[in-house]
Amino acid sequence: MFFYALTGLINAVTSTVLGLFVFLNDFKSKINQGFVLFCTSVAVWSYGYYFWQIADNADDALFYSRVLMGGAIFISVSYLHFVLAFLGRLPAQRKLLIFSYAIFIIFFLFNFTPLFVKEVVPELSFEFWPKPGIVFHPFLILWLAYVIYCTIMLLLEYKNMDAIKKSQTKYILTGITIGFIGGSTNYLLWYGIPVLPIGNILVALYVIFTAYAITKHHLFDIKVILTEILVGSIGLVLFVQAWMSVDVGMKILNWIVFILFVIFGYYLIKATIQEIKRREQIEKMDKELRKTYKELKKLDVAKSEFISIASHQLRTPLTAIKGYVSLIKDKAYGEFPSKMKKSLNNIYSSVERLIKLVNDLLSISRIEAGKIKVEPEEFFLEELIADILEELRNLSKARNLYLKWERRKAPLSKVFMDRAKMRQVILNIIDNAIKYTQRGGVTINYKQENRLCRIEIKDTGEGMTRAEISNLFKTFSRGIAGQRTWTEGAGLGLYIAKKFTEMHNGKIWVKSAGKEKGSTFYIELPIKYEEKS
């Protein structure tokens, strides 16, 4: 019987020590209060278990078996107390907790009567084993029900916890569950089931797992009290040693060591407190940042959806306006006064700009939502560039600029990419180069080598600084020269061009020697588009 007595003593001491540490750390904490009550219940049960096992007569064995049941009665309800506090449900479920304590107090009142523990009789190798009274049966059912209810609560809340609380819950839940299973093996013999309570030693595992949660996952913030206990214990030994020294030289040396240790200990405790405060601040900031990120993500999705819906709604009436203005200009509705011609041209140009802006906004919303896909086809990129230059020829002439293409005599290979998207990329870059150049012109160069094709678009415009270049491919971002020379731009074209190029596994960049020295845009793409796996 010594083994079973020893298991009870181990459980009692570990529960007492852990409960005392948590109590000294911060008993005002609701979580700490619940856990201390739980440790106290386990400790009372375990001390009673120890004395019951070493009892040498039936009267003592019956008394201590009732003492141990006095602790066991409150184990499940104090576990409920701790779990509600740990999950932050204590205020909302206070009535449930009060009702539960009331029920188990009633069982406790029956505990020291034959209605709860009837008698002690020989069972297997035990000389005095308790037998249940009539009130014990509903108690045991309710006791198990509370344990299962608390465990289910922890499991259901687990997925909604942050990383630290998940780690705490994992170890607490594992330890307490194993402990309850181990402790439950004691009740089989109460009903004559011939199974020895060898699982009783597993009760101490809740202490081991909780201690791990304390040291590794900051449960109860007990690090300060442990540091204080360590410093105080060593300081006490050094003080006694200095006080008891007989030799004068050793006495002085011991007092110096004691004083130095006190100073060192003070700063050690202070550093530990500061470390905990910093950790709490970092954890709080991290939690707030994650919350802010989620909110920003929601706003970003809402913004993209709004832009997409608004663009769709705007494009239809704008296209209709453009069509009617075009019909009026073509005199489909008859002659119109000559003085209206300029106004109609202005309306037509404004509507075209609005349609382009709406299309750009729609493209951005679809890009950010991941709804645009590359639809590659085989074609000559040279022919696409030639078509674009022909389209922009009138714009360059109107601005008295040359538009030169250094086309190679030998034909180059066909490319495999999305024709419509690459047309928009190249058109946008050349169009910008013309609009933002005051004198000179634009030169286009196209070459292929090493399975790559590169388009260079060089202008004699005002050039850009490094700061302008770094922001150039962002949404609603434009260079200073662009804002001054072409005020109608929205700063979306280059962002779309960059995204479309990247969708083809290519890259786009710009170089400029500085102000008044022009700029060169580079578009580099694989000749054959391959979808990334």
Image (cartoon, rainbow, N blue to C red):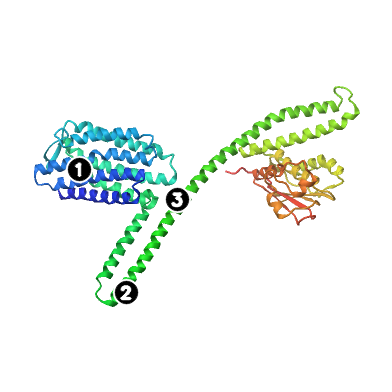
Where disc 2 sits, the SS reads: helix
- Residue behind mark 1: 197
The 10 Å Cα crowd at callout 1, few under 14, some 14 to 19, many 20 or more, is some
Q: Residue at x 42, y 47 (%)?
A: 164
Where disc 1 sits, the SS reads: loop
Asked if residue 411 can be seen in this view, the reply is no
The residue lying toward the viewer, choosing from 221 and 387, is: 221
- Residue behind mark 3: 280
- Position of residue 241 measured from the top left corner of the image (x, y, whole percent): 27, 69
Proximity of marks 3 and 2: CB atoms separated by less than 8 Å: no
- Residue behind mark 2: 253
Residue 475 in the image: above or below residue 347: below
Could you tell which of marks 1 and 3 lies nearer the N-terminus?
Answer: 1
- Give the Cα separation between the discs numbered 1 and 3: 43 Å
Q: Left or right: 325 with respect to 413?
A: right
Q: Left or right: 65 with respect to 275?
A: left
